[in-house]
Amino acid sequence: MAGLELLSDQGYRLDGRKATELRKVQARMGVFAQADGSAYLEQGNTKALAVVYGPHEMRGSRSRALHDRAVINCQYSMATFSTAERKRRPHGDRKSTEMSLHLKQTFEAAVMTQLFPRSQIDIYVKILQSDGGNYSVCVNAATLAVIDAGIPMRDYVCACTVGFVDETPLADLCYAEESGGVSSLALALLPRGGQIALVQMDARLHQDHLETLIEAAMTACKCVSKVLDEVVRQHLQETSVLSR
Amino acid sequence: MATVQVSEAEKVYILHGIRDDLRVDGRGCEDYRHMEVETDVVSNTDGSAKVTLGHTAVLVGIKAEIGKPRPMIANEGYLEFFVDWWVSANATPEFEGRGGEELGTELSNTLYKVFNNQHSLDLKSLCISPGEHCWVLYVDVLLLQCDGNLYDAISVAIKAALFNTKIPRVHISTDEEGGKEIELSDDPYDCMRLDVENVPCIVTLCKIGHRHVVDATLLEKACSVASLIISVTHRGIITCSRKVGRGSLDPESICEMIEAGKRVGKALHPPLMKLLQQEESLGKKRQKVGFLC
């Protein structure tokens, strides 16, 4: 670990950010005309595309249809050129399946599925470039895509990955920080009510620090939600006829 | 490719229009849709390009890795293609899982035939030390949206991405035991570029009624029985041709289609090269748009 200081004495991280600073978020909705909803989001160097189809009739096995709400089907995949080393298997590997399940769980908490019984909503997310915080960028991109598709949600779903180094929580980790042995926590939040849709951590962290870390994650998510809200309003202004 | 449902009345309408050289969106039979090409979209690849042709969107990323040359041809590098079908055009069940894979394999096999030979690209320049090390270019095609004419969009994207590819220079040194050591140059600007003059572009011609059209949309493809895929270089030389589709073609049609394809293909190269060189000359000043347009 010599030579790679995740947090310098002056409080700067590897890429020059401060501990609570997020990377630059740029997003665009309605990228693909054929899909019901689509969005592109980049957070620093991590770029993701999300596409939503639905709500539509159940495809495949009718028996999986739920009588009182819609089934959300998520698929997460990474482009073969997204990581520094070329990824041979973009679909079907364990990490992708796990991520898909997490995304499904996150969106089942936010989308008002009880309005569409016996139907299916498909959310496909693709990582074009991976530089840390893959899950968070996917959730943020998928939120915009679901909004673009016009599917009602309880609130925006914003996610952020935070880490804990030298008694300080770092918001929005990049790849170097994630792989540098930082205890990282991924959190998906519904900002208005402060409800947590998903929290996931698989590192060791002292219990005393957990609350600080979650607080930091929630603050970061609220910042992201402001950006997403801005993007949505701008998109509406551009596409609606009324403002012209 | 993905299919779309089209009624008999619509088919007749499209057929009659094409007979009078007027397609549904107002194009002539040999006109392409609005095409947008942008290179260097993904920064951690060695070369990348994004092509939008109407509603068809394709993203190509190229990564160069050092590998062992093929046993038959020891003094050349080679290309490896992989086509990733992200989401089917209309999310139809046929393309979920297996179906998409088969089509991806068909596409990548055609790409091997068209691009992976000495006539398209100077593969000898990819050799580092004969029989031991060579550059392998992994060309990954990501199909984002499909509205017909995938081959053309993919070939333009591959040509643009190959133009954009920067391969780091290598220095071979022999160490004490006699083994070879490969050193990659540290300078990010010290790189080798590929000469894409002879890289062909694929033109797909669909036979609809008695006439043929270039750059068919999904709707037009549903009205056609057979298509001809030809790859044309900038000099108008055909390097590869293939007939696809469940119908049959008579020899005169094939000859006509080949002539038309040669004309259209030859005309495709100069504006593309001009655009690529223009983009290149802007260098750092160019504002990267990607999907944020």
Image (cartoon, helix red, strand yellow):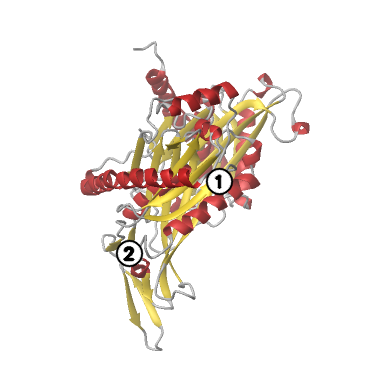
The residue depicted at 61 percent of the width and 26 percent of the height is A111
The residue type indicated by label 2 comes to Pro
The N terminus of chain B, quarter of image? top right
- For the point 33% across and 44% down, the residue is B263
Residue count near mark 2 (Cα–Cα under 10 Å), binned few <14, some 14–19, many ≥20: some
Q: Position of residue B71 (x, y in %)?
A: 49, 76
Residue A77's label in the rendered image is 1
- Tell me if residue A133 can be seen: no
Is residue B14 in view?
Answer: yes
The front one of A15 and B290 is B290
Q: Specify the amino acid type for callout 1.
A: Ser
Residue extending furthest bottom? Answer: B177
SS for dot 1: strand
Look at mark 2 in the image and give the residue it sits on: B168
Q: Is residue A184 above or below residue A189?
A: below
The percent position of residue B76, horizontal first and vertical second, equals 40, 71
**Where on the picture, by quarter, is residue B247?**
top right
> Percent x, y for residue A47?
44, 42
Q: Nearer the viewer, residue A193 or B200?
A: B200
The chain letter under disc 1 is A
Left or right: B179 as drawn, with respect to B269: right
Q: Quadrant of residue B203?
A: top left
Q: Position of residue B9 (x, y in %)?
A: 57, 21
